[in-house]
Image: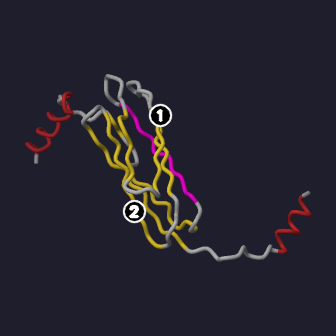
């Protein structure tokens, strides 16, 4: 076990900077949980450039038209963070899992994932809750 610990320590002490991926996504999967059918849901993924040069997002591609990513076309400075906003249109009910591929620095990719479960909403709105109406009158 001493040899393993020494070998691991040696690897972390002198990393090979040529192969270090500059794009870090602290959380690459988002679970929306239960979301109502017909209502768009959005999530913002934080990304960070840990490299020593500006990072360029070349493209962000969703696997289907129900998922729409938005991102800044500006370079991400070394040490800076940026956001990729992903919208999901919940057309059909049931579980879903969609991947979004981030293409950057001309030849590198990273995959983000959104998932959840869409439930059917009632065809007509629920009747107004009388106690909510009463609370509104009291608080005004």
Which residue in the structure is indicated by mark 1?
72
Which residue shows up at 8% across the image and 42% down it? 3
Q: Which residues are magenta?
A: 40-49
- In the picture shown, does residue 61 fall above or below 77? below
Asked which quadrant contains residue 105, the reply is top left
Q: Where's residue 117, x and y in %?
A: 48, 69
Which residue shows up at 32% across the image and 22% down it? 53
Q: Where's residue 94, x and y in %?
A: 46, 73
Image quarter hosting the C terminus: bottom right
Asked which quadrant contains residue 137, the reply is bottom right
Which residue in the structure is indicated by mark 2?
97
Q: Where's residue 80, x and y in %?
A: 43, 28
Q: How many marks?
A: 2
Q: How far apart are the alpha carbons under marks 1 and 2?
A: 24 Å
Q: Nearer the viewer, residue 10 or 31?
A: 31
45 is within the stretch colored magenta: yes
Disc 1 secondary structure class: loop
Which residue shows up at 44% across the image and 28% down it? 74
Disc 2 secondary structure class: strand
């Amino acid at each position: 076990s001493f040899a393993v610990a020494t070998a691991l320590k040696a690897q972390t002490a002198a990393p090979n900077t040529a192969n270090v991926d500059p794009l870090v996504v602290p959380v690459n999967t988002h679970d929306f949980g239960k979301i109502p059918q017909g209502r768009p849901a959005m999530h913002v993924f934080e990304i960070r450039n840990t490299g020593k040069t500006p990072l360029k997002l070349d493209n962000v591609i969703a696997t289907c038209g129900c998922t729409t990513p938005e991102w800044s076309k500006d370079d991400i400075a070394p040490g800076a963070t940026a956001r990729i906003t992903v919208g999901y249109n919940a057309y059909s009910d049931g579980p879903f899992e969609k991947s979004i591929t981030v293409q950057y620095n001309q030849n590198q990719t990273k995959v983000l994932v959104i998932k959840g479960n869409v439930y059917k909403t009632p065809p007509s709105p629920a009747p107004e809750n009388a106690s909510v109406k009463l609370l509104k009158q009291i608080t005004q």
